[in-house]
Image (tube, helix red, strand yellow):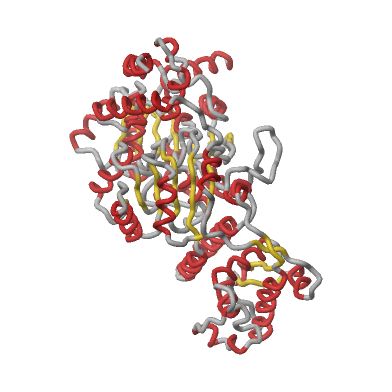
Amino acid sequence: MQQSSNHLLISLLKHYFGFDFFRPLQQEIITDSLLGKDTIALLPTGGGKSLCYQLRSLAAPGLTIVISPLIALMKDQVDALSEQGIQATFLNSSLSREASAQCRRRLENSEYRLLYVAPERLALDGMLEQLERWQLSFIAVDEAHCISEWGHDFRPEYRQLSLLRDRFPDVPIMALTATATLRVRNDISQLLKLRSPASYVASFNRPNLSYRIIQRDQPLKQLIEVIRDHPGESGIIYCLSRAGTERIAQALNAKGFSALAYHAGLDAEERTKRQEQFINDEVPIIAATIAFGMGIDKPDVRYVIHHDLPKNLESYYQETGRAGRDGLPSECVMLYSAGDAVKLHRFIDELSSPQERDIARDHLRSLLRFAESSTCRRIELLRYFGEQYLSPTGAAPDFCGACDNCLTPRPSFDGTLAAQKILSCAVRIKQKSGFSVGLLHLVDVLCGAKTEKVAKFGHDSLSTYAIGKDRPRAEWLSYANELIQLGLLQICPERFNVAEVTESGAAVLRGLQFVELHQPLVKAGLSVEKRKLQRRRTGHVEVDPVLFGALRRLRLDIAREIKLPAYLIFSDATLQQMALLKPKSEAEMLQVSGVGDVKLKRYGARFLQVINNS
């Protein structure tokens, strides 16, 4: 029985999707769901989450409903499925009344295997009754972390999804996400009312991505440096503000690049237009707020730049995960300034809800530890999600060879005196006032800042006031965060996140312990040579560049003919395999990963002609 089920799944995988093998955990997730079990699937961006419910819908009768948060993603997914010969549709506010009525008629006639809807649609009158008539047999909840307040993108409308379990108690539910800590996974299970769910957590490691954090200095120049490393390739630049996206896009266009801004301040029609221009390779660069990206299924984004600090590490992971979804080498760069941390601290202080403040502070501390860490970025990122970094051989190294800290380690120095200045300042403040203060106020006193708060508490009369004025404020903030990592300072969240000296810190003050600190982030970043080394990593394949270019041009021609994004024809990874294997017949073309029966029939002859003429 199990063997025949496996054979069915693999034959469906090849026929519709063109793959001979499943990615890690996909087959197990689908099999458990077909057995009627609830499942939680935590797969990294680009790890094949969508295929889990798409293939599952083909392997069993009835309708699969997919809860998806963004309308743009629904259209892209339905277009992609149609290209693979799979009947799918969506119901949302973008449809005209006539189109919506036609869609419902076809659903009544059981013509579709998958239906995409937004969570709020389930609350509309009659929707649950219609799902009963349409023979609902499976529920997939995409971006399931949106249900948890501890998730990085909480959406209250996701809370009403518990209605599905109440109304359809026997229909299995699959919850999917790319980023969820254990706390968030527990929320997903509880709030969706999952029953003893089978939980699958794939590795968070994206081996084809490289990570780099550089101190922001002349940011436009730094952006251009990265863009020039990726001529003609697609990239996303994330910004905190709408004005920032507009400013960066204008500046890049003035320098001869083709860029667009994207943010929630644009009307829906303009947002859709700009998104499609990027997806269709008409414009290679998009400067965007976090309003952009969650619904983007473009696999050939080659770089993601954070011009400003992301909200938290989950957001950083998901946003950098837009790069290299096809498995080819891609780059993630963050421009970092300790001043950003100051702004975010102050923004958090203005939040009205104590719970929101606690969550935001917890997230910010983790993000700053990552940004200012002198150890391997990949190891730090995986550790945050509870995973140990393992090399392909199964070893647990302390070096990934594809981040700035591994390729150009930051110099260390005897930081004992600097540490003693910070620690003694914390002690003197507590002695004078009877209470400890937060990290920002501590650094204000150290640097001799003339703030209202410093004057109010008389901290400008301390012997440690301004003893650090010889160094920039951002540098002291970097050192203070490193002392927290070393366990010499601790943040006490139960007491308004004040900074206090630990027992180990007290030993440093007494001269009993040496402290090694690292220089703050260097301004220059990696050399061109180092970046080239970085890109030649997992997923890199040497192919005939002339043939690969010809295949890409043909793909673009076809995409324009049928008015669909080029990646829906074939991915870059599939074109690379064609250029490497150079198939001469349809049978040989079917051996290329990503070429299934439907696409072979539609496009095979034209691609074979280009290959045979090369």
Q: Closest to the observer: 489 or 479?
A: 479
Q: Position of residue 36 (x, y in %)?
A: 52, 27
Q: What residue is shown at x 47% (from left), y 18% (from top)? A: 581
Q: What residue is shown at x 32% (from left), y 48% (from top)? A: 257
Q: Position of residue 215 (x, y in %)?
A: 51, 60
Horizontal arrangement in the rendering, residue 482 relative to residue 137 (left or right) = right
The relative height of residue 540 versus residue 245 in the rendered view (above or below) is above
Residue 42 visible (yes or no): yes
Q: Position of residue 453 (x, y in %)?
A: 52, 83
The image quarter in which residue 25 lies: top right
Furthest residue to the left? 98
The relative height of residue 219 versus residue 339 in the rendered view (above or below) is above
Horizontal arrangement in the rendering, residue 408 relative to residue 317 (left or right) = right
Furthest residue to the right? 512
Q: Position of residue 229 (x, y in %)?
A: 44, 44
Q: Quadrant of the N terminus?
A: top right
